[in-house]
Amino acid sequence: MSGQELILAIDQGTTGTTCLLVDANLAVVARANQEFPQHFPKPGWVEHEPEEIWGSVTAAIAAVLAKSGVDPARIVALGITNQRETSLIWERSSGRAIHRALVWQDRRTADTCAALRTAGHEEAIRRETGLVLDPYFSGTKLAWTLDHVDGARARAEAGELAAGTIDTFLVWRLSGGAAHVTEPSNASRTLLWPLAGGGWSETLCALFRVPRSILPTVHPCTARFATTRGVPGLPDGLPIHGIAGDQQAALFGQACFAAGEAKCTFGTGAFVMMNTGATPVHSSHGLLTTIGWQIGDQTTYCLEGSAFMAGAVVQWLRDQLGILDSADQIEALAASVPESGEVVLVPAHAGLGAPYWRPHARGLITGITRGTTKAHLARAALEGIALQVADLLHAMSADTGAPLRVLKVDGGAAANDLLMQIQADLLGVPLARPKMLETTALGAVFLAGLGVGLWPDREALKAAWQEDRRFERKAAPAQLEALTKRWRRAVELA
């Protein structure tokens, strides 16, 4: 390696696509983001138009190359991280989707999950996959698409269709249709891939009515998945060498390589993940057991809990209620009052995930008086985000039997100092915020760089992680206890 090599990372998220160009010293050469529309055809339904996703990817690639001014020939590998569980089905002949992608937030298959639960399948599914029966995951989404698009099941059986999560769709497009692939961190979120690996489960595919023939081949996270062909701005033959789902990529980008290390990504949702090492830990507190990554033949497992609404709550205050003109105004507005005036906001707009798993729950605001202002609502929104995360981490500590020592934080909302202070107060453990908040994209960079040999091992990456700021508990215990009691009462009502 000459030292001039660059890694291109594609971070395909829920509301937009970010591309990063990073050099061998982990310096960001250029960054570009391209948003795309969200579609809500019915209450509880959330869809993405695949062509709009692909357009955001090509636009972000073009923008990052233009900003950097570098010769694309210097790029030695491309890494991908993606919104997980969002899934779609497309034609093998054209690459065109037969229906919009069903987003991870989509709740339309709640009744299907309830029927499978009533039929007694939940415990076996949880034992084999580490997941719960919830519309969050991909299996019921794929089945819904096959059931609701005319002729789709027959076309699938005839070999005309391909399915996958967003990483799979992007590799298909980036490779000119040459590769139908994924890796274990995304596969393990479908309800169709066993924790033990070994291939797509015939039993689970039959139960969820998803033909194995439409599912991708699964490779380790640092494998050479494909090479680019016909992508505007990029040379043909550029290797795609690292893929992981967004939350696993963020854990990897936070250099949480040892068992017991944990992070929370504050994005559209809030996603807590803890490395549990080479052995899966099954939760008795409503958490998920999932695959973190596979490098070579070694698999790392994790415990995970997700709050579906975090940054999305701020977007809701801005777009639906008009309380904010821009999302970054919430910190100053919330800080303008010393506390929330006993207002509690439960961000269950898309149901409640772990540790509750109540898909039919809905958002709730309690404690409003004549003295309630938009500042109180803003502060209650930040508290609601932090209280969800605290619930998840308390459950995680109970499952592992070990107290958390430090929580690494990342994502766009981690730049909100007030939110991070509220979170540190509620947890009672330090929060470590890195200099680079885009650790999801950085995880894709790490995996691609390891795959292509740009860095020798994970120790070299761990040494490069840099802390920006640490948050410690400041709030009085009595204040925190009262807030927690109000939260628990409100959650029961949501």
Image (cartoon, rainbow, N blue to C red):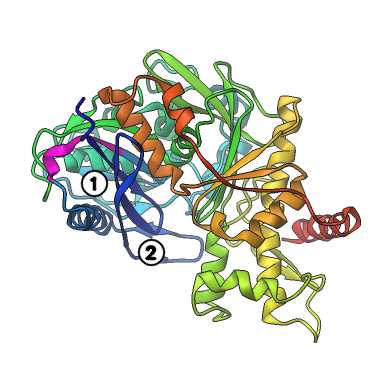
Q: How far apart in space, not on screen, are marks 2 and 1 (Cα)?
A: 26 Å
**Residue topped by disc 1:** 151
Q: Is residue 339 magenta-colored? A: no
Q: Please give the name of the residue rendered at 49% of the width and 49% of the height, measured from the top-left corner.
A: 109
Q: Between 347 and 100, which is closer to the camera in this rendering?
A: 347
In the displayed structure image, the side of residue 61 where residue 167 appears, left or right: right
User: Percent position (x, y) of residue 34?
Assistant: 30, 61
Q: Between 212 and 76, which is closer to the camera in this rendering?
A: 76
Look at the image and give the residue range highlighted in magenta.
Answer: 71-79
Q: Please give the name of the residue rendered at 46% of the width and 47% of the height, measured from the top-left corner.
A: 436
Which mark lies nearer to you, 2 or 1?
A: 2
Which residue is the extreme one toward the right?
A: 478
User: Percent position (x, y) of residue 89?
Assistant: 28, 44
Question: What SS does tag 2 mark?
Answer: loop
Q: Please give the name of the residue rendered at 14% of the width and 33% of the height, measured from the top-left corner.
A: 178
Name which quarter of the figure residue 181 lies in: top left
Residue contact between numbered discs 2 and 1, judged by CB atoms under 8 Å: no
Dot 2 amino acid type: Gln
User: Percent position (x, y) of residue 241?
Assistant: 26, 29
**Residue topped by disc 2:** 38
Q: Between 151 and 470, which is closer to the camera in this rendering?
A: 470
In the displayed structure image, the side of residue 54 where residue 490 appears, left or right: right
In the displayed structure image, the side of residue 429 where residue 93 appears, left or right: left
